[in-house]
Amino acid sequence: MQKYLFIVTILVLVFSCKNETAHHSKENSHKTDGKASASVKYLDTLILDGENHFKSLRQVTFGGDNAEAYWSFDDSKLVFQAKNPKWNAPCDQIFVTGVNDVWKGDRVPPMVSTGKGRTTCSYFLPGDTTILYASTHLAGDACPPEPKKRKDYVWPIYDSFDIFVTDLKGNIKKQLTNTPGYDAEATVSPKGDKIVFTSMRTGDLELFTMDIDGSNVKQVTSELGYDGGAFFSPDGKELIFRSSRPKTKEDIKKYKDLLAEGLVMPTEMELYICNVDGSNLRQLTHLGGANWAPFFHPSGKKVIFASNYEYERGFPFNLYLINTDGTGLEKVTASGMFDAFPVFSNDGKYLVFSSNRNNGGGHDTNFFIAEWKE
């Protein structure tokens, strides 16, 4: 498949973007509800034709590569990863923002990672005073090397990633994983009792769960393929995740050869759902292409995700909704660029996601908060 088939913001984004045409001209100010809508002016010019689930839309970051923004339990803050030399982050580091903040010009949000190595996949822990994230900093202060350019698009799976807990001032409180190989992509159950993460400890990229303190580690998946990017359902009973699942001899060999180099090729992925213990595993999407970044709708009966399945060249990426029985596929965004990492607030009123829209035609990826409507 072509090397441009899959483009993600957790790596360097190198593509040209076009300016969108604004389809809604008015600006709205919303009354405070004590959380995300407190005295904020929302720019409806960011909403495009066909984006009917957005009542309003507000840009939070302006510049750099900003991705994977996740809500605090009380919906008042977001934790996210960003690559931005102006923020002393030459490769991804973890930052925290209030939902009403705007990071533009010389403003720099608080960094809660060490500023060393490379980080990924942060998430608030219950109480909203601590955050977990994965980092390579124990292996060195410098950013780990990017994969060499090759015909196929690949992701690096750094074996130096481990999962840590930090306070809001950047003080590491605990190391949750210390096994050899990749441990990352950790998220927390809405019930506050469990963590799911991806690990190479068995020799393949599988899902595992652990209790909130890092104890009681249990393996969830066991089939060959990259199982990752998992999230809990609102009731904490199920997991939604992406998987590559190679089937042919050729694909299996290619997957294993890349994995031996610490790489995966995420150009063909579908979504799967299973119970937290791994039972009742079932494939949700059969779309082809790259289907990823899934997150449960607050009802628990739908999933929102990013996909490029409509486009032979593998780009752009749009957001879609689908019922958990695989029916009712619905397109949510229409930027014609890159929209991904959608995450609903705990109260279901807002959706945060990353996008290339409104970046002046450059390469920046920022995140946005949409006021959601059914």
Image (cartoon, helix red, strand yellow):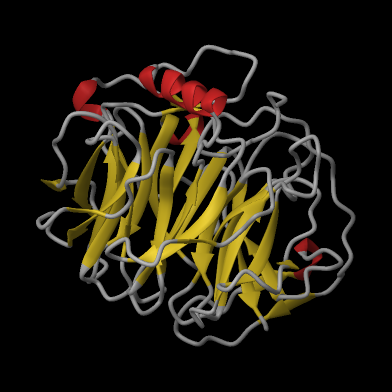
Name the residue at 65% across, 38% down. 364
Image quadrant where residue 4 sits? top right
Horizontal and vertical percent for residue 145? 41, 16
Image quadrant where residue 87 sits? top left
Horizontal and vertical percent for residue 85? 49, 29
In the foreground, 37 or 163: 163
Name the residue at 43% across, 77% down. 346
Q: Could one spot residue 368 in this view of the protein?
A: no
In the foreground, 239 or 367: 239
Q: Is residue 348 left or right of residue 206?
A: right
In the foreground, 92 or 191: 191
Q: Is residue 62 above or below residue 342?
A: above
Q: Is residue 304 above or below residue 166?
A: below
Q: Is residue 283 left or right of residue 275?
A: right
Name the residue at 23% across, 46% down. 170
Horizontal and vertical percent for residue 280? 39, 67
Extreme-front residue of the structure: 249
Horizontal and vertical percent for residue 126? 23, 70
Q: Is residue 20 above or below residue 7?
A: below
Name the residue at 38% across, 47% down. 121
Quadrant the N terminus occupies: top right
